[in-house]
Amino acid sequence: MSHSIHENIKLIQSEIGNRELVVVSKYRSLPELQNVYDSGHRHFGENRVQELVEKYTALPKDINWHVIGHLQTNKVKFIAPFVHLIHSVDSLKLLKAINKEAAKADRVIPFLFQIHIAQEESKYGLTAAELAFILTTNEYKLLTNVKCKGLMGMATNTQNEQQVAGEFDALKSLYDAHATQNDFDTLSMGMSGDYAIAVSRGSTMIRVGSKIFL
Ligand SMILES: *Cc1c(COP(=O)(O)O)cnc(C)c1O
Protein backbone atom coordinates (compact mmCIF):
# COMPACT_ATOMS: atom_id res chain seq x y z
CA MET A 1 0.00 0.00 0.00
CA SER A 2 2.73 2.49 0.95
CA HIS A 3 4.30 1.65 -2.36
CA SER A 4 1.26 2.76 -4.31
CA ILE A 5 0.93 6.02 -2.32
CA HIS A 6 4.51 6.89 -3.21
CA GLU A 7 3.89 5.91 -6.86
CA ASN A 8 0.73 8.01 -7.05
CA ILE A 9 2.49 11.09 -5.70
CA LYS A 10 5.38 10.59 -8.12
CA LEU A 11 3.04 10.22 -11.07
CA ILE A 12 0.99 13.33 -10.22
CA GLN A 13 4.14 15.35 -9.55
CA SER A 14 5.51 14.35 -12.96
CA GLU A 15 2.23 15.42 -14.60
CA ILE A 16 2.13 18.85 -12.96
CA GLY A 17 5.79 19.83 -13.38
CA ASN A 18 6.90 22.63 -11.09
CA ARG A 19 3.44 23.39 -9.72
CA GLU A 20 2.86 22.72 -6.04
CA LEU A 21 1.05 19.56 -4.96
CA VAL A 22 -0.87 19.76 -1.68
CA VAL A 23 -1.65 16.23 -0.52
CA VAL A 24 -5.15 16.40 0.94
CA SER A 25 -4.90 14.20 4.01
CA LYS A 26 -8.34 14.79 5.58
CA TYR A 27 -9.87 11.62 7.11
CA ARG A 28 -6.57 9.77 6.59
CA SER A 29 -4.80 8.11 9.52
CA LEU A 30 -1.50 9.16 11.08
CA PRO A 31 0.34 6.12 9.63
CA GLU A 32 -0.91 7.08 6.16
CA LEU A 33 0.34 10.65 6.63
CA GLN A 34 3.66 9.42 8.00
CA ASN A 35 3.90 7.30 4.88
CA VAL A 36 3.43 10.33 2.64
CA TYR A 37 5.98 12.21 4.76
CA ASP A 38 8.50 9.37 4.31
CA SER A 39 8.22 9.76 0.55
CA GLY A 40 9.68 13.26 1.06
CA HIS A 41 6.45 15.21 0.66
CA ARG A 42 5.96 18.19 3.00
CA HIS A 43 2.70 19.93 1.94
CA PHE A 44 -0.50 18.57 3.52
CA GLY A 45 -4.04 19.95 3.33
CA GLU A 46 -6.80 19.52 5.92
CA ASN A 47 -10.31 20.93 6.14
CA ARG A 48 -11.17 20.51 9.83
CA VAL A 49 -9.33 22.44 12.54
CA GLN A 50 -9.53 19.80 15.26
CA GLU A 51 -8.20 17.07 12.98
CA LEU A 52 -5.48 19.39 11.72
CA VAL A 53 -4.28 20.25 15.23
CA GLU A 54 -4.20 16.58 16.26
CA LYS A 55 -2.12 15.70 13.21
CA TYR A 56 0.15 18.72 13.62
CA THR A 57 0.81 17.66 17.22
CA ALA A 58 1.59 14.05 16.33
CA LEU A 59 3.68 14.47 13.19
CA PRO A 60 7.11 16.01 12.35
CA LYS A 61 7.27 19.79 12.66
CA ASP A 62 8.67 20.51 9.20
CA ILE A 63 5.33 19.73 7.52
CA ASN A 64 3.67 22.69 5.76
CA TRP A 65 0.00 22.59 6.78
CA HIS A 66 -2.63 24.05 4.44
CA VAL A 67 -6.17 24.84 5.59
CA ILE A 68 -8.42 24.16 2.60
CA GLY A 69 -11.89 23.98 4.17
CA HIS A 70 -14.33 26.54 5.51
CA LEU A 71 -12.81 28.18 8.59
CA GLN A 72 -14.80 29.55 11.52
CA THR A 73 -13.49 32.70 13.22
CA ASN A 74 -13.51 31.07 16.67
CA LYS A 75 -11.21 28.26 15.46
CA VAL A 76 -8.49 30.50 14.00
CA LYS A 77 -6.54 30.72 17.25
CA PHE A 78 -5.79 26.99 17.21
CA ILE A 79 -3.96 27.07 13.87
CA ALA A 80 -2.49 30.60 13.84
CA PRO A 81 0.84 29.62 15.44
CA PHE A 82 1.80 27.15 12.72
CA VAL A 83 -0.44 27.17 9.62
CA HIS A 84 1.47 27.52 6.33
CA LEU A 85 -1.31 28.78 4.02
CA ILE A 86 -5.06 29.30 4.47
CA HIS A 87 -6.82 28.73 1.13
CA SER A 88 -10.35 29.46 2.27
CA VAL A 89 -10.71 33.11 3.28
CA ASP A 90 -14.21 34.10 2.23
CA SER A 91 -14.96 37.20 4.30
CA LEU A 92 -13.30 40.28 5.72
CA LYS A 93 -14.59 39.25 9.14
CA LEU A 94 -12.65 35.98 8.97
CA LEU A 95 -9.57 37.79 7.70
CA LYS A 96 -9.67 40.20 10.62
CA ALA A 97 -9.83 37.27 13.03
CA ILE A 98 -6.82 35.68 11.30
CA ASN A 99 -4.93 38.98 11.46
CA LYS A 100 -5.61 39.30 15.18
CA GLU A 101 -4.42 35.79 16.02
CA ALA A 102 -1.43 36.14 13.70
CA ALA A 103 -0.40 39.28 15.60
CA LYS A 104 -0.63 37.39 18.89
CA ALA A 105 1.56 34.66 17.42
CA ASP A 106 3.94 37.33 16.07
CA ARG A 107 3.49 36.08 12.50
CA VAL A 108 2.34 37.17 9.07
CA ILE A 109 -0.03 34.43 7.88
CA PRO A 110 -0.22 33.80 4.12
CA PHE A 111 -3.69 33.21 2.71
CA LEU A 112 -5.79 32.93 -0.46
CA PHE A 113 -9.21 34.38 -1.07
CA GLN A 114 -11.64 31.60 -1.98
CA ILE A 115 -13.72 32.52 -5.02
CA HIS A 116 -17.07 31.00 -5.87
CA ILE A 117 -16.77 29.66 -9.43
CA ALA A 118 -19.00 26.55 -9.39
CA GLN A 119 -22.63 26.31 -10.39
CA GLU A 120 -23.34 24.50 -7.14
CA GLU A 121 -25.02 26.53 -4.40
CA SER A 122 -23.21 24.79 -1.59
CA LYS A 123 -19.68 25.88 -2.33
CA TYR A 124 -18.28 28.74 -0.27
CA GLY A 125 -16.48 31.72 -1.71
CA LEU A 126 -16.56 35.36 -2.74
CA THR A 127 -17.86 36.74 -6.02
CA ALA A 128 -15.52 38.73 -8.26
CA ALA A 129 -17.25 41.94 -7.16
CA GLU A 130 -16.90 41.10 -3.46
CA LEU A 131 -13.18 40.42 -3.94
CA ALA A 132 -12.64 43.68 -5.81
CA PHE A 133 -14.45 45.54 -3.05
CA ILE A 134 -12.46 43.99 -0.20
CA LEU A 135 -9.14 44.70 -1.92
CA THR A 136 -9.93 48.41 -2.07
CA THR A 137 -11.08 48.92 1.51
CA ASN A 138 -8.90 50.62 4.09
CA GLU A 139 -9.92 47.98 6.60
CA TYR A 140 -8.23 45.41 4.39
CA LYS A 141 -5.15 47.50 3.69
CA LEU A 142 -4.58 48.01 7.41
CA LEU A 143 -4.23 44.28 8.15
CA THR A 144 -0.48 43.88 8.61
CA ASN A 145 -0.32 40.33 9.94
CA VAL A 146 -1.85 38.60 6.90
CA LYS A 147 -0.53 38.42 3.35
CA CYS A 148 -2.69 37.53 0.37
CA LYS A 149 -0.80 35.22 -2.02
CA GLY A 150 -3.62 34.73 -4.52
CA LEU A 151 -6.88 32.90 -5.10
CA MET A 152 -8.47 29.47 -4.66
CA GLY A 153 -11.55 27.98 -6.27
CA MET A 154 -13.40 24.71 -6.76
CA ALA A 155 -15.05 23.89 -10.07
CA THR A 156 -18.44 22.21 -10.35
CA ASN A 157 -18.32 18.46 -9.75
CA THR A 158 -19.33 17.38 -13.25
CA GLN A 159 -18.11 15.21 -16.14
CA ASN A 160 -18.58 18.22 -18.43
CA GLU A 161 -14.95 19.18 -19.07
CA GLN A 162 -15.88 22.29 -21.00
CA GLN A 163 -17.82 23.63 -18.08
CA VAL A 164 -14.96 22.89 -15.67
CA ALA A 165 -12.46 24.54 -18.05
CA GLY A 166 -14.71 27.59 -18.34
CA GLU A 167 -14.93 27.95 -14.56
CA PHE A 168 -11.14 27.67 -14.20
CA ASP A 169 -10.69 30.22 -17.00
CA ALA A 170 -12.91 32.65 -15.13
CA LEU A 171 -10.84 32.20 -11.98
CA LYS A 172 -7.57 32.66 -13.90
CA SER A 173 -8.88 35.89 -15.46
CA LEU A 174 -9.85 37.22 -12.05
CA TYR A 175 -6.42 36.23 -10.72
CA ASP A 176 -4.68 38.01 -13.60
CA ALA A 177 -6.78 41.11 -13.09
CA HIS A 178 -5.50 41.53 -9.52
CA ALA A 179 -2.13 39.71 -9.53
CA THR A 180 0.30 42.51 -10.32
CA GLN A 181 -1.15 45.13 -8.05
CA ASN A 182 -1.49 42.72 -5.14
CA ASP A 183 1.70 40.74 -5.61
CA PHE A 184 -0.06 37.38 -6.11
CA ASP A 185 1.90 34.22 -6.90
CA THR A 186 -0.51 31.39 -6.06
CA LEU A 187 -3.57 30.14 -7.93
CA SER A 188 -4.92 27.09 -6.09
CA MET A 189 -7.21 25.15 -8.40
CA GLY A 190 -7.57 21.48 -9.30
CA MET A 191 -8.50 18.34 -7.35
CA SER A 192 -8.35 14.58 -8.11
CA GLY A 193 -10.99 14.75 -10.83
CA ASP A 194 -9.96 17.95 -12.57
CA TYR A 195 -6.32 18.86 -11.87
CA ALA A 196 -5.20 18.15 -15.45
CA ILE A 197 -7.71 20.72 -16.73
CA ALA A 198 -6.76 23.14 -13.95
CA VAL A 199 -3.06 22.94 -14.81
CA SER A 200 -3.81 23.57 -18.48
CA ARG A 201 -5.76 26.68 -17.38
CA GLY A 202 -2.99 28.25 -15.32
CA SER A 203 -3.14 26.66 -11.87
CA THR A 204 0.05 26.96 -9.78
CA MET A 205 -1.09 24.71 -6.93
CA ILE A 206 -3.33 21.63 -6.89
CA ARG A 207 -5.03 19.90 -3.94
CA VAL A 208 -5.31 16.14 -4.38
CA GLY A 209 -6.63 13.55 -1.94
CA SER A 210 -8.53 10.55 -3.25
CA LYS A 211 -6.31 9.95 -6.26
CA ILE A 212 -3.33 9.54 -3.97
CA PHE A 213 -4.86 7.37 -1.24
CA LEU A 214 -7.34 5.56 -3.49
C1 LIG B 1 -11.38 17.26 -0.23
C2 LIG B 1 -10.87 18.46 -0.90
C3 LIG B 1 -9.93 18.35 -1.94
C4 LIG B 1 -9.40 17.04 -2.46
O1 LIG B 1 -10.41 16.34 -3.12
P1 LIG B 1 -10.10 14.99 -3.91
O2 LIG B 1 -11.21 14.88 -4.89
O3 LIG B 1 -10.10 13.90 -2.88
O4 LIG B 1 -8.76 15.13 -4.56
C5 LIG B 1 -9.45 19.53 -2.50
N1 LIG B 1 -9.90 20.75 -2.11
C6 LIG B 1 -10.80 20.88 -1.12
C7 LIG B 1 -11.24 22.26 -0.74
C8 LIG B 1 -11.32 19.75 -0.49
O5 LIG B 1 -12.23 19.89 0.48
Image (spheres, rainbow, N blue to C red):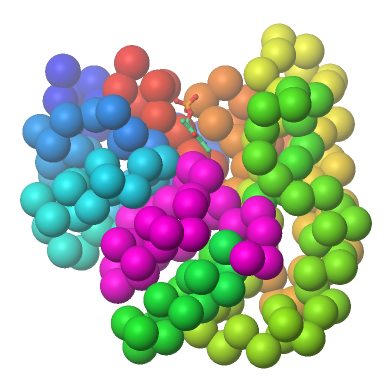
* Residue shown at 48% from the left, 52% from the top: 72
Residue 208 percent location from the top left of the image: 45, 33
Q: In the visual, does 39 lie left or right of 166?
A: left
Residue 47 x, y percent position in the rendering: 41, 41
Tell me if residue 137 comes above or below residue 88 in the rendering: below
Q: Which residues are magenta?
A: 65-93
152 left or right of 103?
right
Residue 63 shows up from this direction: yes
From this view, report whether residue 187 is shown above or below residue 21: below
Name the residue: 70% across, 45% down.
Answer: 125
How many marks overall?
0
Observer able to see residue 18? no
Where, by quadrant of the figure, is residue 193 drawn? Answer: top right
> Foreground residue, 74 or 178?
74
Residue 161 highlighted magenta (yes or no): no
Query: Is 79 on the left or on the right of 183, as rendered?
Result: left
Q: Residue at x 54, y 54 (%)?
A: 87
Give how far across and how far down residue 68 sits, in percent. Answer: 48, 46
70 shown above or below 166: below
Please give the name of the residue rendered at 47% of the width and 79% of the height, measured from the top-left corner.
100
Quadrant of the image occupied by residue 191: top right
Q: In the picture, which quadrant includes the C terminus?
A: top left
Name the one closer to the observer, 152 or 71: 71
Asked whether residue 68 is drawn in magenta, I would say yes
Q: The N terminus lies in which quarter of the figure?
A: top left
Q: Quadrant of residue 13?
A: top left
The picture places residue 61, in percent across and down from the top left corner, at 16, 63
In the image, 75 versus 20, the foreground residue is 75
